[in-house]
Image (cartoon, rainbow, N blue to C red):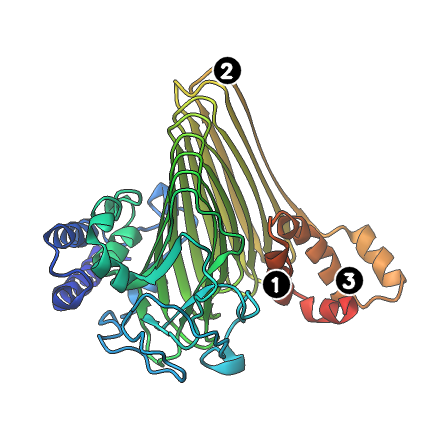
Amino acid sequence: MSDAAASTAAIRYADAFTRREPTLPGHDLAWLRDVRRAAADAFSRSGFPTPRHEHWKYTNVAPIEKRAFDLDGAGAAPRPTSGDNGAGGGRLLEGNGASGTLPGGNGTSGAFLDGGGAPRLVIVDGRLDSGLSNLKALPPGVTVEDFPRALERDAAFFESLLARIVRPEKTAFAALNTAFMDTGAVVRAAPGAVADVPVHLVFVSGSEGRERAYSPRIVIAAGAGARIAVVEHFLGLDGAVYLDNVVTEIDVAEDAAVEHYKVQQAGAAAYHVAALEARLARGAAFHSWAVSLGARLSRHDIDVTLDHEHARCSLDGLYIANGRQHADFHTNVEHVAPHCASHEYYKGIAGGRGRGVFNGRVHVHPHAQKTEAHQTNRNLLLSRNAEIDTKPQLEIHANDVKCSHGATIGQLDEQMLFYLRSRGIAESAARGMLTYGFARDVVERIARPGLRGPIGAAVLGHLPGGGDLREILQ
């Protein structure tokens, strides 16, 4: 895209920020105004990335840049819902037990993963939906709030954390989110708190009928020795065009453990860009499972820094790109301290003219002796026109380490396909069985059985031939 077009986009976003700044959450906090303005300036200087940027070599965001997304936000009024319990603009919910239905009915790209029983906070088109939320069953020591209310209630907590893990200047999209963040969720676990059930954060977009850009900010903080699991679930109307620009900051204190599950089922015409970064203290553990199924274009940046001894992380993921979908995963693990471990296991599936991208970087710093780091990326091409680009990277500057990486790209086994066909199984179902078999081990790595089944069903629904296979499995 030309410099003139780029500057036009930058001006459009700068004008929108000037209009919105006086109404954004926390606009009366001097420190937050400074953070937002610095982020807006960073974006004005950088503009959107292009394929000339090394980290965006395989992902062209020109379609996002060209669209004049509505940046004016959802406004101050709460979204009206049946069963509204008065939470309105963001009171700390106690929940009313309602399971509800998603806006748009069957037109959405998925359904709730929790079966209606687990603690759940639901954001619809940037506004808290208290009728669909249910936080009655929150474990002791765990609080969940929507972003504006949490900021209003405990500004000091945010001043010590917000934009200090995911730096606004890191990427253009992180800068935009920091400037415009007006929705999202905050999950906090007190020291020693143990959550037996995961907290679900559900974001539904695209039901307003306008091309909106959403900027959810998600903050997860686990106190010393706490154990918590959080699910981020993104849904959207299949025909809606919108942008989810998400930033998640995770702070894991000493000897705490956070399980993070991400299921991206945005509408087929949507754009989904997300940055997640975790900061781990001594002896802390972070486990990530990410599944990317929807959206026309999706990008997931996952960064973990291990700068205290005996910290550990595992990152698992699955991306599916059908039709003309584009799915991109970039991971980065910084081994700064000794005696730390990281494990990555990602799989990709591309069919039609879909394109998948995986770039996994592990950086072992000079003082990070006794590091153990392993990375695996396996990919499956289902058509001649599909494409997957994979780039595993190991940068090792220490000599007492155990590190490995590997990547493969292949196709379905024709002999296995012939065997299944010879047993009377239709070709589409046979291909579906082999494809699901390829994806299944990522699903099986999900630690919680209560999530494994629903996420597996969501994966099956997005696979070519998945409908035929579902009938066989039933």
Disc 3 crowd rating (10 Å Cα; few below 14, some 14-19, many 20+) is many
In the image, is 1 to the left or to the right of 133?
left
Left or right of 206 on screen, residue 314: right
Quadrant placement of the N terminus: bottom left
* Number of other residues with Cα within 10 Å of mark 1, as a class: few under 14, some 14 to 19, many 20 or more: some
* The residue positioned farthest toward the right in the image shown: 423
**Residue 423 percent location from the top left of the image:** 89, 62
Which mark identifies residue 7?
none
Q: Could you tell which of marks 3 and 1 lies nearer the N-terminus? A: 3
- Is residue 295 visible in the rendered structure shown here? no
Label 1: which secondary element: helix
The reply to whether callout 3 and callout 2 are in contact (CB within 8 Å) is no
Q: From the top left corner, tell me how far across and down residue 37 is, in percent.
A: 14, 53
- Of residue 62 and residue 211, the one placed in the foreground of this image is 211
Viewer-nearest residue: 351 or 88: 88
Q: Earlier in the sequence, mark 1 or mark 2?
A: 2
Kindly identify which residue carries mark 3: 430
Q: How many marks?
A: 3
Q: Residue furthest top?
A: 399
Q: CA distance from mark 1 to mark 2?
A: 42 Å
Along the horizontal axis of the image, is 183 left or right of 411?
left
Q: Residue at the spot x=20%, y=47% of the render?
A: 159
Frontmost residue, 27 versus 264: 27
